[in-house]
Image (cartoon, helix red, strand yellow):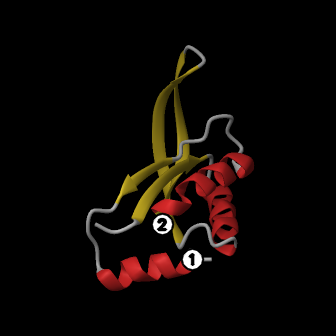
Amino acid sequence: MSDVVVGLVTGPDREQLVRLGRTLVDERLIACLNVVNGVTSVYRWEGEVCEEAEALGILKTAAARSDAVERRIRELHPYDVPEVLFIPVAAGSPPYVDWVSEQVSD
């Protein structure tokens, strides 16, 4: 098993997630962020069912960085409660996993 995790974060639009991704990459908290535009989210918020157009960010980082990534996203994100989920990577291309680890190392 690798120490790499995949993170998910939604946002109001592509531009805000790209800005977020650039900051997290610049700060070496993540190796990269892929932005998928045009997702629809259905959720309950403050007692009401909502349906919103959003963008989805898929980030890659080291598991050891996940707490710092989550804190930084909460500081920068426009939502009161941003989605920040991490999924462990059980296996992957060794050169790619190594690259992710190198990008987020101190």
Q: 55 above or below 51? A: below
Other-residue count near label 2 (Cα within 10 Å), few / some / many at <14 / 14–19 / ≥20: many
Residue under label 1, please give it. 105
In percent of width and height, residue 96 lies at 38, 81
Horizontal arrangement in the rendering, residue 80 relative to residue 102 (left or right): right
Residue sitting at 55 percent across and 46 percent down? 54
In percent of width and height, residue 24 lies at 65, 66
Residue type (three-letter) at the residue carrying disc 1:
Ser
Pointers 2 and 1 in contact (C-beta within 8 Å): yes
Instruction: Place residue 18 in its image quadrant.
Output: bottom right
Whether residue 6 is visible, yes or no, is: yes
Residue under label 2, please give it. 62
Which quadrant, please, contains the N terminus? bottom left
Q: Secondary structure at mark 1?
A: loop
Other-residue count near label 1 (Cα within 10 Å), few / some / many at <14 / 14–19 / ≥20: some
In percent of width and height, residue 83 lies at 54, 42
Which comes sooner in the sequence, label 2 or label 1?
2
